[in-house]
Image: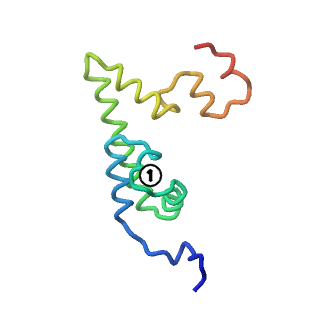
Amino acid sequence: MNAITPLNRLPTSLSWQTDIIILLSRGVSIVEACQMTQVSRATNYRRFDKDPAFKRQVERARAIVELELFQIVRESSDWRAAAWLLEKRYPADYGTARDRLRYARCSCGAASAIMR
């Protein structure tokens, strides 16, 4: 057998994937979840790209957290912490105008012209 096993011949273990889903559903970032499960981000993203069921579960877990944070913002009298987390976790949707322009890869210079 070759010293390097091809990806399609590696044994598939769902335990790390389940752990990633659980961590993401608790609000942990993908980077932190990979570190906590000792799975490289590259492995996680490969599985994400190749396994539609895993992709759906990851997206669902992240959507659940986003919804919970949004509900805290709507229902709480002290919503600033949840709003900050929404802004940092989902900059394309809740970030500042400058962050949204950067996230959209604006090359017109508008992002650098906006002062904070």
- Depth order, front residue of 62/41: 41
Quarter of the C terminus within the rendering: top right
Residue visible at 39% across and 44% down in the picture:
62
Quarter of the rendering containing residue 54: bottom left
The local secondary structure at tag 1 comes to helix
Quarter of the N terminus within the rendering: bottom right
- For label 1, the residue is 34
Residue visible at 53% across and 75% down in the picture:
8
Percent x, y of residue 25: 33, 46
Residue furthest out toward the bottom = 1
Whether residue 107 sits left or right of residue 51 in the image: it is right
- Depth order, front residue of 25/67: 25
Residue visible at 57% across and 21% down in the picture:
97
Percent x, y of residue 38: 43, 56
Residue furthest out toward the front = 3
Check the image and report above or below for 27 versus 44: above
Q: Amino acid at mark 1?
A: Cys
Percent x, y of residue 100: 57, 28
Check the image and report above or below for 37 versus 3: above
Percent x, y of residue 99: 57, 26
